[in-house]
Amino acid sequence: MISKECKRLVEVEFPINEVSNHSMREKFVRYGHPSGLHLWRARQPLAACRAILLALLLPDPCDRHCPEEFKTKAGVILQDLKDPLEYGDMALRKAMLKFIGDFADWGNANEPDFIEMGRGLVEAAYPEKVPLIMDLFAGAGSMPLEALRLGCDAYAGDSNPIARLILKFLLEEIPRYGRELAEELRRMGSEIEKQAMRELAEFYAQDPDGEMPYAHLWARTIRCTSSNCGAEIPLVRSFWLCRDDRSKKALRYKVIKPREGPPFAEFKLFEPITDLGIPEASIIRTRAVCLCCGNIISSEQVREQLSQQRGGADVIFNEKGRRIGGARLLAVVTLRGRKYHYRLPTEKDYRAVYRTKKRLEQMLDDWEQSNKQELPPVPDVSLPPEGTPNFRVQQYGMSRWSDLFTARQKLALVFLTRCIQKIENPIIKDAMAIVMDRCIDYLSSICTWDVQRQLIVRTFSRQALPISWDFCEGSFFGKGPGGIENAIDWVTRVIEAWPGSKIGRVKQNDGTKHMLSDSTPRVWFTDPPAYGANPCDDFSNFFLPWLKRALPGHLLLSPPGNPENTFVMSSVTVSDNTKSDSPQPENYAGFEEAVAKLFSKGRHMLNREDICSVVFNKTAKGREALVTGLINEGWIITASWPISTGTASCSRGKDFTNLTTDVYLICRPRPENAPVGSWEEILRELPQRVNSWAAHLQRQGICGSDLAFACIGPALEIFSRYCRVENVKGETIRPGIYLEKVFGQISTVVKD
């Protein structure tokens, strides 16, 4: 076992540039990547997790306490990566860093040679017992997944039910069943799709050649408020349908003024050569423009009219089944071979929607008459209150999650939930629930049509839930994103890409109550909830009501006594749900207390020789709470490494906010007999520590915000090695005060 005196590789060096590049490229990986399994808003890049974890586990060969046996075995494993002109411990360190940088590449993540080398290095460092990697806020499982890839034991916990379902599937079921699971999932999906064709085909208007629609392009509508007009206004951002270089399609309209009734716009398809001739948008920001008279309808009037329609995603019919309002169908898209075709809607298309609404009403009536023994077939759960960050639909009358779906989407999802309920194999049941969630993300009235790439844009294409004036309704059939065939293809590719590993452990609780052997080497590697962060738990409630219908009684989704309620955030996750620009003091106090409790428990879970990595909070207040919790609860912060996950301009100054950079703090348990520190001596040591470390990093080409973030850890080590710090008056200095000094000193270095 590695002694507590021996530094880990991550505490002295790390290939920042290489890992950052691979983390950014990973965002564009499609098939086979675990991100294709299920949407998760706060997913850590696998490249970063794999690299940080490996550097956490391996000792620094240049440290005098590094075991000789490890250096010998590591030298054999990495002999092809060592520079033939260099010898000794430094050459081995460089080879280890090169391997970590190369292994961060997604193209190498599942390669047998790289996996064998990675696991071999871990076994060389821990010959007696492989380490246990713990993540108490595992989310989508990036950190424990990479632990399994490296041959370690993995323990994952999360309070979010969606996260627990993802973790169970990713860390337990895929490693246990592998390709057999993928084959059975495809078979079950094929049966469900055949059944869907029998039961749902009548609700989609097929073309004369029998082709099912690929997508329906809709627009919400309001009425012109001019007393001389009263025309229906389809709210359209752009009348382009396709702007592909090889094919261009658009809509134009002619105003028809009948003898009786208000005027209306009649649409035609045409093939424009340029933007000239394309009608202007009928909705600009939140104000509408009447196509018939040019009248401007205010934002307040738009909101009021859509609120009366509960968002306006559904068609309104009269008793005879004729459309009289609501959503208007602009065009229907079909896919023949690899070519998209566009046509105008017909009465047949609206009749199919009318039949859908009647069938849905019958389902709800049947449920009412069944004494309501089960949950209603369509979720009737409230959305977060208006003013919740990044939620904008409530002001348009969408007060419940079901308001986000059209009648046809609801019917398809009700059908799918009932099919999943009938599956006897619980493993396939979980897998089909994951498939259903992929469908749901592409089956809502928030989805839009990308005219450049001719594809459906998912509900959560960004961390927000805004109104979509014109929207795209994908088909449940075929190979489109909302179809079950497409969803199964994505999920099975993730299963088949996994190289095989041990089986992880997923727990419903926070992971602090389990019993561990004192002899087990451990690494605590986690990304704790961020203060003032996007409401990931609110976004999860988009899927949860449907999952509870597909998997009734599932312990990971419905704890006893909570059959229908959506997820309630844990005490640690405290985000500002007000309209104020600054977080509320009472929220911050609760967050600070919860973080302190978290790190106190984590401190007692690790042995003296164990190590920890925590992702730095992106907000200034959150960083202060995290650093305060770490230091006050017995941790020494020894290093910090920034890993970029996207491109952004360098941010400087006290806040150092760069939303595309994740900073990994490296921490160790502080000895119980740590001394009291002198504030004055610490302030004298701070400039020297920051300057020397900055110079070391600059020689490696690291600069800007990366340089600033990388200096945080060594600077905090000075303060955190003491049980407390006092000034000459005997007053205790808070970690937050020191953090301000650190940022001030780093700011000076970065500017220079």
Image (cartoon, rainbow, N blue to C red):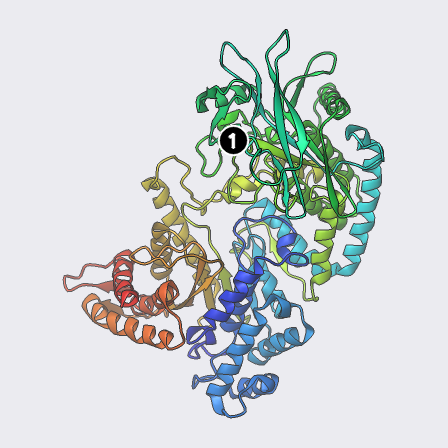
Q: Is residue 602 visible?
A: yes
Q: Secondary structure at mark 1?
A: loop
Residue at 34 percent across and 59 percent down: it is: 632
- Number of labelled discs? 1
Residue at 52 percent across and 19 percent down: it is: 305
Apparent side of residue 47 relative to residue 612 in the rendered image (left or right): right
Q: Is residue 564 visible?
A: no
Q: Tell me which corner region of the image, top left, top right, bottom left or bottom right, holds residue 138.
A: bottom right
Nearer the observer, 528 or 321: 321
Q: Tell me which corner region of the image, top left, top right, bottom left or bottom right, holds residue 496.
A: bottom right
Q: Label 1 is placed on what type of residue?
A: Val
Taking 461 as reference, is 635 above or below it? below
Q: Label 1 belongs to which residue?
A: 393
Q: Position of residue 746 (x, y in %)?
A: 29, 65
Residue at 56 percent across and 54 percent down: it is: 157
Nearer the observer, 611 or 436: 436
Disc 1 residue crowd, few under 14, some 14–19, many 20+, Cα 10 Å = many
Residue at 59 percent across and 64 percent down: it is: 146
Apparent side of residue 338 relative to residue 445 in the rendered image (left or right): right
Nearer the observer, 250 or 167: 250
Q: Position of residue 256 (x, y in %)?
A: 63, 16
